[in-house]
Image (cartoon, helix red, strand yellow):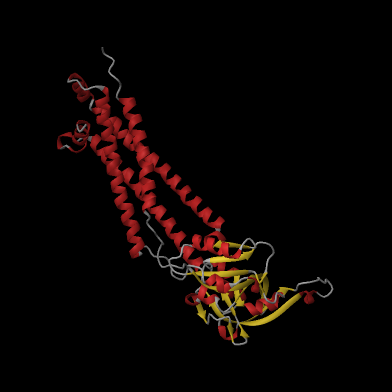
Amino acid sequence: MHLPHLFARRYLFSPASRSVVNLIAGLSVVSVAVPVAAMILLLSVFNGFGTLIRETQSAFDPGLTVTPAQGRTFDTAAIDTAALRRLPGIGATGCILEQSILLERDGRTATATLRGVDDAYGAIVPLAGAVAGDARVRIGDLDRLLVGQAMAYRLGIRTLADADATLYAVRRGTFSSLLPFENYTRRTVPAGGIFRLDLQTERTYVLSSLRLAQELFGHPGRASALVVGLRPGTDPATAKRAVERALGPDFRVRTAEELHASFYRIMRYEKWAVFCIAFMVLVVASFTVVGALAMLIVEKRRDIATLRTLGADTRLLRAVFRREGLLICLLGAAAGVVLGVGASLAQQHLGLVELPSETFLTKSYPVEFRPGDLAAVLAAFAALAAALTNLTVHSMVKADNRR
């Protein structure tokens, strides 16, 4: 069983067998190592960006979101929040009311989604670390706004000392074309803070107190969703099932990832699309192994004839060169793994490649190495190496039909 491996190792490493074929075999190792390393690094970069997006959105989305199964709002008294907080893994709970509004300041206008939040919202969604100014949306009887950095730029807010904005919301009831201003509820509210998250959230959402939102939208005592915070270490799926059992069929419960299910699905598709593209590059690069193996078989014609004379059958000869091809692929894969994993871990822990801090939410390229990605790359390459090596050897080393 060790004889094919012995021959393959001597053909590749023996000082007496140095030739152009060995040089080409060395280049084949490099040509395999580079795409393997690139695949590992690309998947790690996708993982890093996915984790960054999840962390950014977790700063704005709660662990669980409860919405009515029918309709857009529900009576806040319809849910026993005290009973929910007694469930395992459930932390604080709070109500929010969301609806589209028009903002106007000094002749500048912008559309946004106003999210009215209650006093418990800060314990569920910790925004304080991402807010310049005061993160509170209500101080006593004074209501204030939290606007995103992108929205503040659109409205021309340069300082919080003078940052009043007028909010317009469509009034519930009949619509009059004769008196258009009567169709809107209007409030002028100062901005108390500016939050900095991802660009989409910054230019979409404006936060206010739940009381202001209920008055502005004409929904006293009602909310559009109940947000639920989870204790550290709690599995969102397990907590979701517990809340669903407690609330019954009248409410729909979703985790933070389910709120953006289509977005995360697209990210997974993109990741594996990049995997397939990089794998095609690896397929092309692996043909150098085919060339090196074919040239070696041609070079060793005399050795093949000698081995046949000594009694070696076709199966043994094919095993020798099959081991030779797999050995070249193994060396290339090992070098690629060292390069790819090393570069990924170095970037993940040291942040060697930096990004402009004023443009992105992180100072360096986000990278997250996962052993599952390494296993996928090695499994795909192992199947490719076995297929190419077997096809090459089977076509080059013919069966001996002299009987």
| In the image, residue 19 above or below residue 109 | above
Residue positioned most to the left: 16
Q: Quadrant of residue 317?
A: top left
The picture places residue 19, in percent across and down from the top left corner, at 21, 35
385 sits left or right of 201 in the view: left
Q: Residue at x 26, y 13 (%)?
A: 402
Q: Is residue 246 visible?
A: yes
Q: Nearer the viewer, residue 340 or 373?
A: 373
The quarter of the image holding the N terminus is: top left
403 sits left or right of 135 in the view: left
The picture places residue 173, in percent across and down from the top left corner, at 79, 71
The picture places residue 36, in percent across and down from the top left corner, at 35, 47
Q: Quadrant of residue 141?
A: bottom right
| In the image, residue 140 above or below residue 242 | below
Q: Quadrant of residue 213?
A: bottom right
42 sits left or right of 106 in the view: left
